[in-house]
Image (cartoon, rainbow, N blue to C red):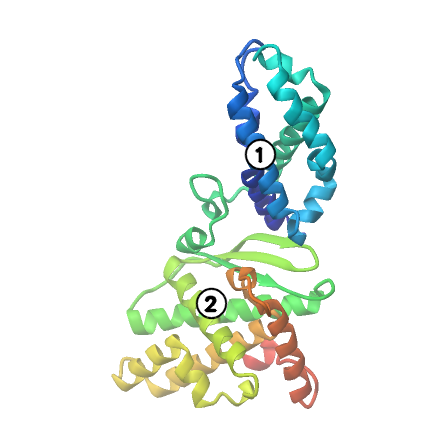
């Protein structure tokens, strides 16, 4: 699991389990009053949050590391619920000296401490998160972050990652040139990778101007929609169906017809857009938000199967390399 996904999943667990509220109710002076009704309500909501999230694989693996099942199993949890109404006074220390409640409190404290460590030490780009420190892809994209994920059933090979990064760079250069020729917008900012995060899959974030990031994100989303909905179409033929599916190519064609851009430049940019987009997508790379969508058949599974079909279609069983498409 990548650190960005780990960070985001722990954050979701903290919200589901009401960890911050539970720690808050026990914070302060030793003789601080803890209201029994508020604590019982939080306990029940926390148990409900656990039951709703433990069924998800991405959360289950985290719960195992924190031994959460022992905290929320019925017998242990019942001890806490039966103890709270019988507490002789509402002092904070009275609760925390009870073993089960102390263990419950320590679990939530460890969860929050782990999140803070990952958040502060491993990920320092705050443009990825909203005011509540939740990961917000739309906000991150609006700040000029192109958030991509490379997927693979095994660890991603270096050769494959190199092809993807080269194609990303060439696609960015092509879009920069398009914006300059069509919109008279000269971009001098140098693209940079602000985060690369590996596991079996790889997340990486490229920081570029907002307009370019939005163009490329829209392009990859539209291209993927075409791929996912046209199983039998041989994409390498660069046919009319592909061109009609991509807004950026419609803009390019309009500019050529209006003589804003000469035919030779338009054709060169079109080929750069199509070829590098194909190299990115068919090396199993998509915008991260597409891979987070919940569907019966996930975009991840569709992408892996489409890649296998493409490999069978090509006579040399090899996806075009960026060098071939320059």
Residue 299: percent from left, percent from top: 57, 69
Q: Is residue 120 visible?
A: no
- The residue at 55%/71% (across/down) is 167
Residue contact at pointers 2 and 1, CB within 8 angstroms:
no
Q: Callout 1: helix, strand or loop?
A: helix
- The residue at 63%/53% (across/down) is 197
In the picture as drawn, the residue positioned furthest to the left comes out as 258
**Mark 2 Cα within 10 Å, few/some/many (few <14, many 20+)?**
many
Residue 154: percent from left, percent from top: 74, 64
For the residue pair 110 and 78, the one nearer the viewer reads as 78
Q: Callout 2: helix, strand or loop?
A: helix
- The residue at 63%/83% (across/down) is 310
Left or right: residue 187 compared with residue 158 = left
Residue 248: percent from left, percent from top: 38, 75
Q: Quadrant of residue 148?
A: bottom right
- The residue at 51%/44% (across/down) is 125
* Image vertical order of residue 244 relative to residue 90, above or below: below
Q: Is residue 39 visible?
A: yes
Gap in angstroms between the C-alphas marked 2 and 1: 50 Å
* Mark 2 vs mark 1: in front: 1
Q: Earlier in the sequence, mark 2 or mark 1?
A: 1
* Image vertical order of residue 109 relative to residue 291, above or below: above
Residue 254, labelled with which disc?
A: none
**Mark 1 Cα within 10 Å, few/some/many (few <14, many 20+)?**
some
Q: Quadrant of residue 116?
A: top right
For the residue pair 271 and 121, the one nearer the viewer reads as 121
| Pointer 2 residue | 172
| Pointer 1 residue | 44
* Image vertical order of residue 53 relative to residue 259, above or below: above
């Amino acid at each position: 699991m990548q650190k960005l996904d780990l960070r985001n999943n722990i954050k979701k667990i903290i919200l589901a389990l009401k960890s911050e509220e539970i720690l808050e109710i026990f914070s302060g002076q030793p003789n601080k009053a803890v209201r029994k009704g508020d604590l019982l309500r939080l306990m029940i909501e926390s148990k409900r949050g656990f039951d709703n999230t433990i069924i998800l694989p991405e959360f289950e693996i985290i719960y195992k590391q924190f031994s959460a099942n022992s905290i929320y199993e019925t017998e242990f949890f019942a001890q806490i619920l039966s103890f709270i109404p019988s507490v002789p006074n509402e002092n904070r220390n009275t609760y925390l000296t009870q073993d089960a409640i102390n263990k419950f409190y320590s679990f939530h404290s460890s969860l929050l401490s782990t999140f803070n460590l990952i958040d502060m030490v491993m990920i320092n780009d705050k443009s990825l998160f909203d005011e509540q420190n939740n990961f917000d892809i739309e906000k991150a994209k609006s700040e000029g972050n192109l958030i991509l994920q490379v997927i693979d059933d095994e660890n991603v090979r270096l050769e494959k990652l190199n092809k993807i990064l080269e194609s990303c760079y060439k696609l960015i250069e092509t879009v920069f040139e398009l914006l300059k020729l069509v919109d008279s917008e000269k971009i001098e900012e140098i693209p940079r990778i602000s985060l690369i995060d590996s596991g079996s899959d790889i997340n990486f974030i490229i920081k570029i101007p907002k307009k370019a990031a939005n163009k490329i994100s829209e392009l990859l989303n539209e291209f993927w929609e075409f791929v996912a909905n046209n199983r039998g179409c041989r994409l390498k033929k660069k046919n009319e169906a592909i061109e009609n599916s991509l807004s950026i190519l419609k803009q390019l064609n309009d500019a050529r017809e209006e003589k804003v851009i000469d035919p030779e430049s338009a054709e060169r940019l079109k080929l750069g857009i199509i070829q590098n987009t194909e190299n990115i997508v068919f090396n199993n790379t998509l915008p991260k938000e597409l891979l987070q969508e919940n569907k019966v058949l996930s975009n991840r599974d569709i992408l892996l199967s489409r890649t296998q079909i493409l490999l069978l279609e090509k006579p040399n069983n090899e996806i075009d390399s960026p060098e071939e498409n320059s």
